Amino acid sequence: MTPLQADIRLFEEIDRVVGACELVVPESVRSELDGLATGAGREATAASVAADLAERAQEVTTKESYADDALVALARRGKTDYVVTVDGPLQQRVLEQDVPVIGLSGQNTLGVTEP
């Protein structure tokens, strides 16, 4: 949801920091975004934009139903080279799996945090 909230051109920024890559999104992340998008207000709008952006990524299924757990599981299993998130606790959990995190590096730019 950060692309709208921080005015980030997500795919251009990912391309800038890591180059061309295959993007994946866990099914549970997409489900969470779809649920948040049904509400009203700024969070719903941001979730709707994020859900639209997620359509550009290949959906992957994991056994974890909670979005954060699914991202950590992908990292633990070596199924992803990076995880994109601005959530501090999630960043820490991913870094503990020895997977770099792509997150905010400035007001509207992304950067990589290595484990």
Image (spheres, rainbow, N blue to C red):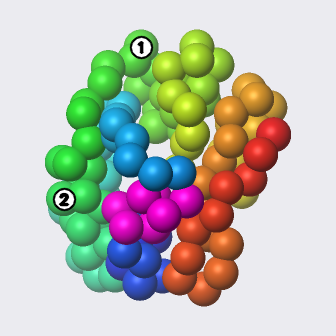
In the picture provided, is 86 more to the left or to the right than 28?
right
Image location of residue 21, percent across then percent down: 39, 41
In this view, 57 is above or below 111: above
Which residue is located at x 41 percent, y 26 percent?
A: 65
Gap in Å between the C-alphas at discs 2 and 1? 23 Å
Amino acid residing under circle 1: Lys
N-term-proximal mark, 2 vs 1: 2
* Helix, strand or loop for the magenta stretch, by majority: helix
In this view, 77 is above or below 96: above
Crowding at mark 1 (Cα within 10 Å: few <14, some 14-19, many 20+): few
Residue 37 visible to the viewer:
no
In this view, 25 is above or below 50: above
On whether residue 84 falls in the magenta region, the answer is no
Amino acid residing under circle 2: Asp
What is the secondary structure assignment of the residue under circle 1?
Answer: loop
Range drawn in magenta: 11-17
Which residue is located at x 22 percent, y 65 percent?
A: 48
Q: Quadrant of residue 85?
A: bottom right
Q: Quadrant of residue 29?
A: top left
Q: How many marks?
A: 2
Image location of residue 104, percent across then percent down: 62, 69
Q: Quadrant of residue 106?
A: bottom right
* Quarter in which the N terminus is drawn: bottom left
Residue bearing mark 2: 52
* Quarter in which the C terminus is drawn: top right
On whether residue 15 falls in the magenta region, the answer is yes
Residue bearing mark 1: 63
